[in-house]
Image (spheres, rainbow, N blue to C red):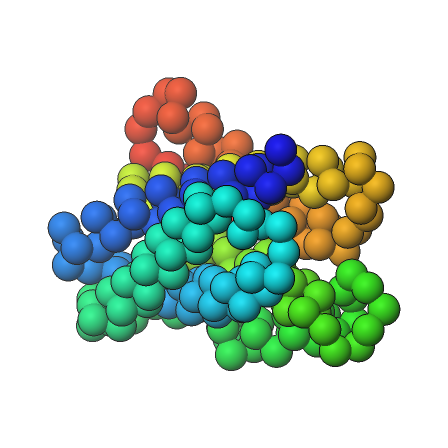
């Protein structure tokens, strides 16, 4: 059951990414989107391809379908951000750029990962979780700068947060079975908490309608 929660969490993210692709190509614009967020997600997807092949996650064809779809969508989003880069001049604060977040995630992975070996696939697993936990920070930063968030962009970020909530259920399921990946659980938990206020505003917007105002 737990592996299905993991896969479903990423499939939810794929749905959000497809919505974002529709928005980008219909408007031919990436205004308000963070290239650093998309680069971090691409790095995490490529990392996940490597270590997933050595886990129980690939015992089902759906896992391969999810990995393939996640890879295609993240590559397309990165290409879209590059192609339409002239439509925006906004970038995240420099400590939230991908070239800073990547090394930080790697150091955290080396220091805090499942198992005792210093060099192992477990480090790569931890790196994936940590860089994903940080990936949404540049996007949230830009959205706070924009104040009013475009509808499809708001749905994309809301769906991303929901996908992490599903994965928290995955980690909890493993914990109940005696597999205590506390560091990885904390990474997803922090990811969700950091976007908690946004999730509340987004859910309220879905219920009441109107513009999504996201500010400090």
Q: Position of residue 67 (x, y in %)?
A: 43, 55
Decide: is 80 above or below 100: above
Residue 81: in sight, yes or no?
A: no
The quadrant of the picture occupied by the N terminus is: top right
Residue 204: in sight, yes or no?
A: yes
At x 27% / y 69%, what residue is drawn?
Answer: 79
Near-viewer residue (41 or 51): 51
Q: Position of residue 202 (x, y in %)?
A: 44, 34
Q: Write down the quadrant of residue 34 in the picture.
A: bottom left
Decide: is 26 above or below 167: below
Q: In screen coordinates, is 152 left or right of 215?
A: left
Q: Position of residue 195 (x, y in %)?
A: 56, 45
At x 59% / y 65%, what residue is drawn?
Answer: 51
Q: Position of residue 4 (x, y in %)?
A: 55, 38
Q: In screen coordinates, is 86 left or right of 191?
A: left
At x 25% / y 52%, what residue is drawn?
Answer: 21
Q: How many numbered marks appear?
A: 0
């Amino acid at each position: 059951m737990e592996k299905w929660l993991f896969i479903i969490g990423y499939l939810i993210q794929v749905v959000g990414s497809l919505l974002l692709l529709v928005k980008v190509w219909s408007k031919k614009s990436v205004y308000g989107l963070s290239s650093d967020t998309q680069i971090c997600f691409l790095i995490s997807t490529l990392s996940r391809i490597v270590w997933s092949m050595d886990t129980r996650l690939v015992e089902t064809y759906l896992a391969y379908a999810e990995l393939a779809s996640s890879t295609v969508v993240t590559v397309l989003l990165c290409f879209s951000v590059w192609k339409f880069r002239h439509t925006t001049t906004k970038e995240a604060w420099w400590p939230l750029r991908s070239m800073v977040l990547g090394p930080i995630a790697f150091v955290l992975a080396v220091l805090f990962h499942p198992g005792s070996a210093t060099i192992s696939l477990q480090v790569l697993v931890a790196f994936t979780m940590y860089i994903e936990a940080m990936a949404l920070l540049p996007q949230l930063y830009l959205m706070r700068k924009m104040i009013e968030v475009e509808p499809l962009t708001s749905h994309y970020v809301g769906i991303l947060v929901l996908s992490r909530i599903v994965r928290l259920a995955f980690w909890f399921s493993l914990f109940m079975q005696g597999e205590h990946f506390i560091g990885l659980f904390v990474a997803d938990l922090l990811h969700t908490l950091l976007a908690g206020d946004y999730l509340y505003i987004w859910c309220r917007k879905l219920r009441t309608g109107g513009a999504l105002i996201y500010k400090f």
